[in-house]
Amino acid sequence: MSTLKVTVEQLTVHPHPNADRLELAQVGLYRAVVAKGQFSTGDHALYIPEQALLPDPLIEELGLTGKLAGGARNRVKIVRLRGEVSQGIVCLPAQVDGVDLPAAAAAGTDFAELLGIVKWVPPVPVSMSGQVEPAPDLIRWIDVENIARYPDIFTAGEPVVATEKIHGSACLFTYDRPSDRALVSSKGIGAQNLALTVSDTNLYWRAVRRFQLPDVARKLAASLEVDRVALFGEVYGAGVQDLHYGANASQDDSIGYALFDIAVGSQANPRRWLSPAEIDSALADLAADVPRVPVLYDGPYDIDTLLRLADGAETVTGTGANIREGLVVRPAAERYSEVLGGRAIGKLVSPGYLLRAGGTEYE
């Protein structure tokens, strides 16, 4: 998931092609349906993204009582209104009256706490949780922001690699060479600097053992002469999320796993991400047979091409049996992003995936 920030954005307003009383307010590459005449191009307004949980007073003020998602009808979710996809809410609640909106936009001020908005986190199934222990040496995964919200992460023509985003659950595996210790966690648990204790029934430990990740990481640590190696992969299959790609996570021999990233650490540099080419080379040198996420594009950055690739059918099964979740885009050479204030990496999510019925989003 992305981080949750409620920020002021400058709008570009477009006509709604199918409704005389509605318009489309564009934020980045997102568009949200608004009442006609409510905003004009160049105006500033608050943008509340998907996965936000709104307090009841704000819901009432915005006239959204009973119209949001979830059992409590308080969660922002992508919807289709009169044939147009609407992502997030564009509004000007009373609590921002008197705020210098252009200045807040320039500063990137986050209004989530002021408005009582929090991020929605789905409950985790028992098979994906377990006993935990402190893990200060765990290399954590990061929140990957949507390029549609931050369209300036990459520059036109910059060499990038786009991999298919698989709908599973991120498995964090860190091998600490000095102690010869393996740490296993999920994205949500790892964010708390915690690891899952060894378990024969836990989803992530089962995947780690099934694909012999400790052996791969141990060899990588030695060949790269680093203290720590972190392998990040997507665990998938029936019992993990609603899309299962023909795998079954309840059985060790049919559980799905696909490696999508590697980081290494040392005393001098606690976390360094390997570029796609470095990952290819390192695994090839070891003849490591670890399933990888499919590469769908390798070339100059072109947003229109990538938006088209983000949609359609998945390539994991080779049969297109499931809808494609989207893409994860990285520069061919790892670099820092001024836009994100961290690693340059972004995702594009298929609207069809977001609009599917009965979807699950466990971390």
Image (spheres, grey):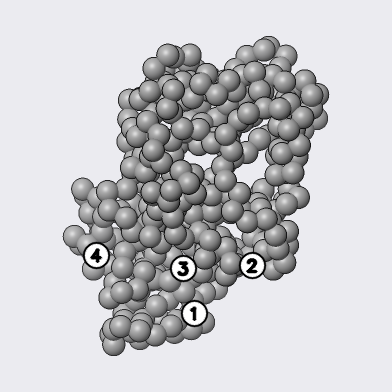
- Residues under numbered marks 4 and 1 in contact, where contact means CB atoms less than 8 Å apart: no
Q: Is residue 42 visible?
A: yes
Distance of label 2 from label 3 (alpha carbons): 17 Å
Disc 4 to disc 2, C-alpha distance: 37 Å
Q: From the viewer's side, name the closer residue of 122 and 117.
A: 122
Name the residue tied to disc 4: 64
Q: Please report whichever mark, 1 or 3, sits nearer to the chain's N-terminal start.
A: 1
Mark 1 = which residue? 12
The disc placed on residue 30 is: 3
Q: As rendered, which of 267 and 292 lies closer to the eye?
A: 292
The answer to whether 9 is drawn above or below residue 319 in the figure is below
Decide if residue 287 is on the left or right side of residue 268.
Answer: left
Q: Which of marks 3 and 4 is nearer the N terminus?
A: 3
Secondary structure at badge 4 equals loop
Which mark is drawn over residue 302? 2
Quarter containing the C terminus: top left
Which numbered disc, 1 or 2, marks the residue that appears first in the sequence? Answer: 1
User: Going from the N terminus, do you reach mark 4 or mark 1 first?
Assistant: 1
1 or 3: mark nearer the eye: 3
Lateral position of residue 72 relative to residue 80, left or right? left
Going from N to C along the chain, the mark reached first, 2 or 3, is: 3
**Mark 1 crowdedness (10 Å alpha carbons): few <14, some 14-19, many ≥20:** some
Q: Nearer the viewer, mark 1 or mark 2?
A: 2
